[in-house]
Image: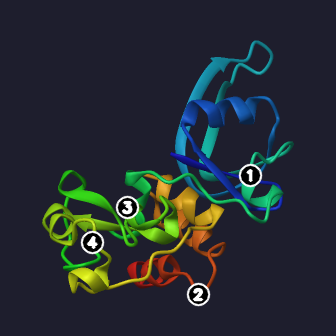
Amino acid sequence: MVLRANVAGMPLEWIDYREAARLYTQGQVAYSCGTPLYRLRGGTSAQSGQRTVLEINSIIATRGHSGNPGNLRTDYVPPLNNQTLFRRDGNLCLYCAQRFADGELSRDHVRPLSQGGADIWTNVVTACRRCNNTKAWRTPEQARMQLVAVPFAPTYAEYVYLKGRRVLTDQMHYLLAHFPRSSPLHARLRSALG
C-alpha cells in the first residue's frame, strides 16, 4: 500500500498502486518520497519510440483537498472498531498481558455500559475472552483486576497507522514523526524501529 499525504506532509490515507498511478498521471502528485514500490510500464511513444515507465514510491503527497478530518476539526475522534482497537493495544490483553490472535480477543468496556460507561476509545481495551468473561459486567476494581495500560484515543496520524496492514519501515518513520511524543504508540513504534 502507498501512504498518501497532503502537500503539507500530513498523512491522509492508504491507497493501492492503481489509485497512486491515477494521481500521478493526472498531475496531482506534488512530490514523493520513500522507497520505490512499483514500476509500471505503459505503451511506446510514437514520437520517441520509448516505452513509458511510471515509478510509484511508498509515500506520495497530493495537491488539492486534504480529506483529513483531523486537520479540519480539533475535536475529531477516529471511528472505533475492533480491528484498530486490537492494533492500538498491540493484540495484548490489557488484563493478563498476553498476546493473542484477533479471533481470541474482544472489546472490553473498562466502565461497563450497564454502569453508565460509553463505547469510546478512552473506555475500551483489548481483552482475551477469558479475562473479559471473568471481569463480566464489573469495573476492574470490582473484579479485582488491574489494567496494564491506560486506554487512549488515537490522533488522526495514529489512526492512519492503525489502519495500515503491512506498513513499511520508511512509512513507519514518516508516520512516527506525526505522532505525539507522549503517545504509547510513539514509544512502541520507536522501540520496534530500533
Q: Is residue 160 left or right of residue 83?
A: right
Q: Which residue is label 4 attached to?
A: 92
- Given the current orientation, which residue lies at the most extreme front position? 115
Q: Which residue is mark 1?
A: 68
How dense is the environment of label 3, judged by Cα within 10 Å: few (below 14), some, or many (20 and up)? few
Residue 74 appears at what percent x and percent y? 78, 65
Q: Mark 1 against mark 3, which lies toward the viewer? A: 3
How far apart are labels 4 and 3 at the CA level? 25 Å
Residue pointed to by mark 3: 114
Tell me the kind of residue under disc 3: Ser
Residue at image position (30%, 86%) is 141
Outermost residue, right side: 64
Q: CA distance from mark 1 to mark 2?
A: 22 Å
Residue 177's spot in the image, x, y percent? 64, 75
Q: Is 84 placed left or right of 186 in the picture?
A: left
Q: CA distance from mark 1 to mark 3?
A: 35 Å
How far apart, in angstroms, are the residues tagged by discs 4 and 1? 29 Å
Residue 108 against residue 81 in the figure, above or below: below
Q: Earlier in the sequence, mark 4 or mark 2?
A: 4
Reading the image, the residue beneath label 2 is 182
Quadrant in the rendering for residue 144: bottom left
Dot 1 alpha-carbon crowd within 10 angstroms: few under 14, some 14 to 19, many 20 or more: some
- For the C terminus, the image quarter is bottom left
Return the mark for residue 14: none
**Furthest residue toward top:** 46
Give neighbour class at mark 2: few <14, some 14-19, many 20+ (Cα, 10 Å): few
Query: Dot 4: what SS?
Result: loop
Q: Nearer the viewer, residue 65 or 111?
A: 111
Could you say whether the residue bearing mark 3 is in a helix, strand or loop? helix
Give amino acid for label 2.
Ser
Q: Which amino acid lies under the numbered mark 1 shown in the image of this protein? A: Asn
